[in-house]
Amino acid sequence: MNEDKAARYQRLKRWASVISLAWTAGLLAALVLTGGTLALRDLSAGLARAARAPDPLAPFVVVAEYVLLLAALHELGSFPIDWYGSFTLERSYGLATERFGHWLSGRAKASLVGLVLGVAGAAVTYVALWSCAAWWWVAAGGVFSLAAVTLTMAGPVLLLPLFHQCRPLEREPLRARLIRLAARAGVPAIGVYEWRLSDRTRKANAALAGLGATRRILVSDTLLSDYTEDEIEVVLAHELAHHVHGDIWKGVATEVGLIFGASFVASRVLARAVPALGLTGAADVAGLPVLLLAALALGVAALPAMNAVSRAHERRADRFALDLTGNPAAFTSAMRRLAFQNLAEPQPSRLTRWLFSSHPPIEQRLDMASRWSPGSRR
């Protein structure tokens, strides 16, 4: 296959993602089809009895034990896949700067956070099933939606510091320039933070994170150290566009819609699965893999549409950045350098874009910039 370094890297990253998804779906399906989920439920109940959990807490302990056992099984396959996709592959292409111990520590933190959220999510689901069997998906969907909004708001101040160091940007002339840019965009004065990525990767990035009081612009130290102020300004203008256009709130609204949709679909699938799988009822914790499979299937089915919307938002943000800065030369140089530095695939296939791409191909973005002029402003 005649492909360049970036295309080969991105192809291998996609395969790692597909294999990871296949492992998750395959494990859940195997537990359902072989009756392994019933054995896992019985083992969880036995552990709860051995722990002599008080009667009021016993159902919660069984649910928590089930989630812990399921997570342990999942880890058997997910660890080597993650090790290859997020560590070995990154190092082999010269992108990673971290040692294995640092990567392992970060992954352990992510796994622990995921486990806590998983146990909490399962507890919410089964409290809803125990309390309002007919409409449990509405109650669970409401709690999950509230959690999604809360995590979006709290992420920059609670979750991000667990994995990355962030501090207010200390380069005063640049900070003042970026604040003026935000004012021109019609965005209230917001914090601009240096986001340390250099201890993990050579990639450069910027992001708009949080909502309301937690909203902040994050500019990676790898971007700050290697790019001109004009290039940093145009990258920031792109991120400001997502705030101006309400893209974060639109993303949250989409997530809420998917949560309720997944909850409804899962409730219908579970109702049909109860007699077929020999469950004691819809509230039997052995049905958890059925719920997860249904939600996973809906998420995968919705991914092409979500990617298409994301690409449209990114194109609009590119136009906004050019309109705001009036600097197509800086935009072009910044996009070229970011694509080269991050090994972005120049022209992925249509199928690849449809299934995997949340951003337009770099060649399309550069072509748009080459055709931009002050008279073409929208």
Image (cartoon, rainbow, N blue to C red):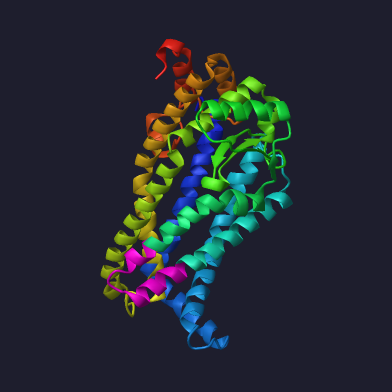
Relative horizontal placement of residue 7, taking residue 26 as reference (left or right): right
Q: Indicate whether residue 130 is drawn in magenta.
A: yes
Task: Name above or below for residue 106 compared with residue 284.
Answer: above
- Place of residue 16 in the rendered image (x, y in percent of width and height, measured from the top left): 52, 45
In this view of the protein, can residue 226 be seen by the observer? Answer: yes
* Quadrant containing the C terminus in the rendered view: top left
Residue 268 in picture, x, y percent from top left: 27, 64
Dominant secondary structure of the residues highlighted in magenta in the image: helix
From what the image shows, is residue 284 above or below residue 306?
Answer: below
Q: Inspect this view and state whether residue 286 appears.
A: no
On screen, 176 above or below 154? Answer: above
Location of residue 312 by image quarter = top left
Q: Position of residue 150 (x, y in %)?
A: 50, 55
Question: Which residue corresponds to the image point at 46% horizontal and 71% vertical from the top-left?
Answer: 123
217 and 89: which one is in front?
A: 217
- 100 or 371, which is in the foreground? 371
Q: Quadrant of residue 283?
A: bottom left
* Residue drawn at the location 54% of the way across and 82% of the way down: 47
**Magenta-colored span:** 122-141
Q: Quadrant of residue 310?
A: top left
Q: Is residue 41 magenta?
A: no
